[in-house]
Image (spheres, grey):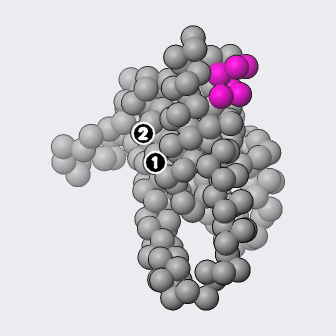
Amino acid sequence: MYKLYVELLVTFFKIGLFTIGGGYAMIPLIQQEIVRHGWLTFKETIDVIAISEMTPGPFAINAATFVGVKTGGIPGATFATVGVVLPSFIIVTLVAKYSVRFKDQPLLQYALYGLRPAVIGLIASAAFLIARTTFFMTPNGSVCVFADIGNILKVVNWRAVLIFVVAIIASLKYKIHPILLIVLSGVLGVILYSV
């Protein structure tokens, strides 16, 4: 069990250390590491993302805690959560200490300009992975691999597409509060999937 705790700590430390841009930018790395270690399947990872977005607190901490509990109980959750938080604590402490001295350095500004598009790319990658899993899941639970364009219509999860379209319209056009939108989407999911 000790080996598992160390593995959770190191894996989530790496996730926290090498992911810049917040929780959404962490999704590809979290998904890759969790599935690679066999702690969760790809589909379970997407479920963790959905659950983490509905609960208070940052996504990465929720995901680390969930995976830790599932694999190693409360001690596993502790090691995984400490692992994902520790790099941020160290980095923020260092940045706070040295930011005044280096804030006007052009090289620092250029590095930040370079990081912004990468963060957008990571978030877009996460959105693509979640969309592919949500909209194109085969009946046996695997993600569809498209042989030709004609297969797309056979494997589209039309219920998920409908909930997505309703959520987009409700958010952009009617400016519905995100919490209300999550609750309404859950209710719509119960209605559509129980039929």
The spot of residue 135 in percent (x, y) is: 45, 45
Q: Residue 120 carries which label?
A: none
Most common secondary structure along the magenta stretch: helix
Does the rendering let one see residue 68?
yes
Question: In the image, what residue type sits under mark 2?
Answer: Gln
Question: Residue at point 51% right, 43% down?
Answer: 14
Question: Residue at point 73% right, 44% down?
Answer: 54
Q: Do the residues labelled 2 and 1 touch (CB within 8 Å)?
A: yes
Question: Residue at point 44% right, 67% down?
Answer: 118
Label 2, secondary structure: give it: helix
Q: Would you name the residue on which mark 2 appears?
A: 32
Label 1, secondary structure: give it: helix
Question: Residue at point 81% right, 54% down?
Answer: 180
Within 10 Å of the Cα at label 1, are there few (<14), some (14-19), or many (20+) other Cα atoms?
many
The spot of residue 144 in percent (x, y) is: 32, 38
Instruction: Give the side of residue 132 with respect to residue 171, left or right.
Output: left
Question: Nearest the camera: 35 or 189?
Answer: 35
The spot of residue 96 in percent (x, y) is: 72, 68
Q: In this view, does 191 lie above or below 141?
A: below
Q: Would you name the residue on which mark 1 appears?
A: 28
Instruction: Give the side of residue 36 with respect to residue 173, left or right.
Output: left
The spot of residue 25 in percent (x, y) is: 53, 56
Q: In this view, does 33 lie above or below 131?
A: above
CA–CA distance in space, label 2 to label 1: 6 Å
Q: Which segment did they paint magenta?
A: 74-79
Within 10 Å of the Cα at label 2, are there few (<14), some (14-19), or many (20+) other Cα atoms?
few
